[in-house]
Every structure is written in C-alpha cells, then in structure tokens.
Amino acid sequence: MHTGRGDAAKRAKTRTRIPVAADASDNSCGFCVNADFERFSQVDDVFARSRHDSTIRSERSDLFYSTYRKPLADWRAAKGYQQNDYAFRNATWHVADIFAEMYEDIDRRDGFLDPLSMLRDGATERVDLGSPKDAATLIKHAAHAAGADLVGIAAYDERWTYTERFSVESLGPKPNKIPEALDRVIVIGQAMDATLIETAPSALSGAATGMGYSQDAVVLLTLAQYLKNLGYEAIPSMNDTALAIPYAIQAGLGEYGKHGLVITPEFGTSVRFGKIFTNAPLATDRPISFGVREMCGICSACSTGCPSKAIPNAEPSRDRHNRSNLKGVKKWSIDGEKCFSFWTKVSSDCSICVRVCPFTRDYTSRRNRIWLRLAGSRFRRFALWLHQREGKGARRQAETWWPGAL
C-alpha cells in the first residue's frame, strides 16, 4: 500500500524534534548536560584544527596525512610500519577516500566534512511502513542484510548537530543545515577487525579503522538509498554533520566509556559508527546499561596504556582540556591535542585504548560472555582481576598477523 505525501506530512507533524536542551538530569546521551551547554562547531574538531590552527598544524601533522598518499619508499621501516603494512592500511581506506575526494573541487569531503551524496532520486510516493515499531523492524532487517553489525534508532537531538561544518577551501566555517522534517536518526555500527586492533599501535592496526570507514560508507549509502526508494528522505553521515557518540548511546547501542568512546555489549570498544537522518516514522530505542560506567570507575587500562597521557584516570568532570572538548557537560573527556600529537609521531592512528579496554573481546566465546556478566555485576572487581591475570589486551607483534615472512 502507498500513502500520498500529504498524509505522511500530517503524521510527521505529530512527531517533534528534541529541542536544544540544558537539562542537568538528562543522562540519555551518556553524560550530564548542564545549563551552560554549547553546541559544537566542526571547526573546533581536532582534525579540522590540524588543517587551520597553527597550534596543532605542523610539518609532522602534514606528513601524517601524506602517509596515506606518498610513495612507499619514504615510509617508516619499524615493525608494524613497513611497506606492506602501509600498503594494506591505505587500501582499506580506498572506498571511503573515493567518496571523500569525489567533489573536492566544490569544497566537499563526503563522509568526513559533508554527508555522503552519491544517491539517486527515490520514489515519488511514500510506502506505508505500518506502525513505527514495524517500520523500525523492517529498516533494521535491511540494515543488517546490507552489512551493518549493529543498528539502533534515536530521535533527532539538535544538541549534537554541528553549529557549522568545516571548509577545507576557506579553512573556516560553512553552513550545516538539516531539514526540519528529519526527526529520526538511524545509527549503524561496524565492528573493527579484532586481530588487527591487537597490533596497535601500528600502521597495520590502522587498517581496522580504514576498513570500518569503507564498510560504513557502503552500508550507509545502501540503507539511505533504500529509504529514498520507499519515498522517504535520507541523509547518510559518517564523521560529518553531527556527533555520532551521543546518538549511538541514545540509540541503545552501548555505554560511554572513560576513553571517550562507546562500549558495546557485542564488540566492546572495537566499533565505528555512522548515522542516517530520515523522516521515516520509526520507533526509537532506549539507552542501555550493562555495567560500563561502574567498571570504568575502577579500571585504568586506557589511562595507563595511553602513551600520550590523553586519557585522565579521574572521575567525570566539567573540565575542558582545550577547545576541542564539549562545553557544558560533565563526563569523561580526553585531550584530543595530545592524542593527535601521538598519531603524528607514529604516522598512523593509535587504537591502544581500544586494544587494552577489558570490554574489547570476542563475545562468540562463552567464556567471554560469562566475563561480561561478571563485569556488569557486583563481582566486577573479580572480572577485572581475571582480565589482568589472563593478560588480555596485550600487544600482538604486527609481523605475526601476516601468514609468513615478507
């Protein structure tokens, strides 16, 4: 059955966006939003600042970006950073890079500074998807079939939309508008390869990141085109447009951790998130709790393991390390400047905090599922002791990942 756009528009009026709020009791995003909260500009993101801010940008940061493009012979020769490691890492970024570079001549970097835009026109009439609950079930089924490892749905929350996007052309802000009717956000999660993460820090572990982004782009475009084919609007987004972490938490995919990342019950910290803004009438999910906040309160693995000391081993606070942190929230916050500085030293992204996190483990194993139950109970200190005793989170030598000597 089909319904005309007029009927669908009437239904849309009954669904309202969540306004910009300053409610100190709101923990749905994983942290406490205070009355002095201010929305974030992508211009202040540490990666954007590495392009325009002289306190961040340097010859070393420029070299960091060039390792994804420059001749192989000029790269590092250390273990985990050899030609073969970089060759594979850069190959995993290839799909994401195609979209990012397609419209650079008109000041777009799809997926990173702008939404993914390679979509065809959809149907002129909207398909009736039934009740919001039925519609959500349908969309999640399609998302999983398209390759998503996790799928959740949240109401649009203006607080997490960037006040402005970053323009590479002008090295300053540009507009960031989302149509008013798009009141639902579909959040997808892509698990990163655990065996690659075990080699962090290395160029090889960076392949897990690149593959996550490339898979993310394919799934987001597929699902967005499906929604358009049903007659609905859809804007697929990776790092652009809005903060993904609060949405992933509001969509019930995981809890916020001390390292500033989302921890999921299926893959721990080893997940990348994308999102789709849509006007499809979808039922929303609820935030979940499975003991992360309590475990992070007694665990210091990420703080201890971080070579740049970017992750404080402290209680959640309102403190900001620099302009790349949110203002007006009480939460665990990392120092993005210190984190990025280490990336530029090793010429690849890091992921040590992902590797050492006790929640990052293979949950297809019954033993690890039992551990997860312990971690979420009053026996969490015992679970942490088991994690340390078993030597989980230890670094794997990158050369052992490859099947044979090169």
Image (tube, rainbow, N blue to C red):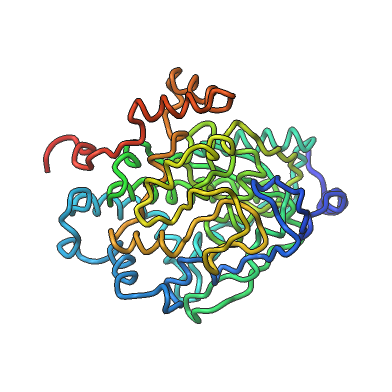
Residue 128 falls in image quadrant: top right
Residue 12 horizontal side relative to residue 30, left or right: right
What's the residue at 22%, 40% (across, down)?
A: 397
Report the quarter where the C terminus lies: top left
Can you say which quadrant of the picture contains the N terminus?
A: top right
Q: Is residue 30 left or right of residue 406?
A: right
**Viewer-proximal residue among 157 and 7:** 157
Q: Is residue 184 above or below residue 380?
A: below
Q: On the picture, is 222 further left or further right than 246?
A: left
Residue at 43% x, 18% y is 367
The residue lying toward the viewer, choosing from 146 and 152, is 152
Residue that lies at the very extreme toward the left in this rendered image:
405
Q: Nearer the viewer, residue 281 or 240?
A: 240
Q: Residue at x 44, y 34 (%)?
A: 358
**Image label count:** 0
Does 387 sit left or right of 33 as displayed? left
Vertical relation: 299 (above or below) 54: above
Q: Reply above or below: 241 against 7.
A: below
Name the spot of residue 66 as percent of width and height, x first. Answer: 30, 67
- Picture quadrant where residue 28 is located: top right
Question: Of residues 286 and 312, which is closer to you in this image?
Answer: 312
Residue 72 location, x and y as percent?
A: 19, 61
Residue drawn at point x = 57 percent, y = 63 percent? 320
Q: Position of residue 19 (x, y in %)?
A: 79, 58
Query: Where does residue 42 sit, x and y in percent of width and height?
Result: 56, 68
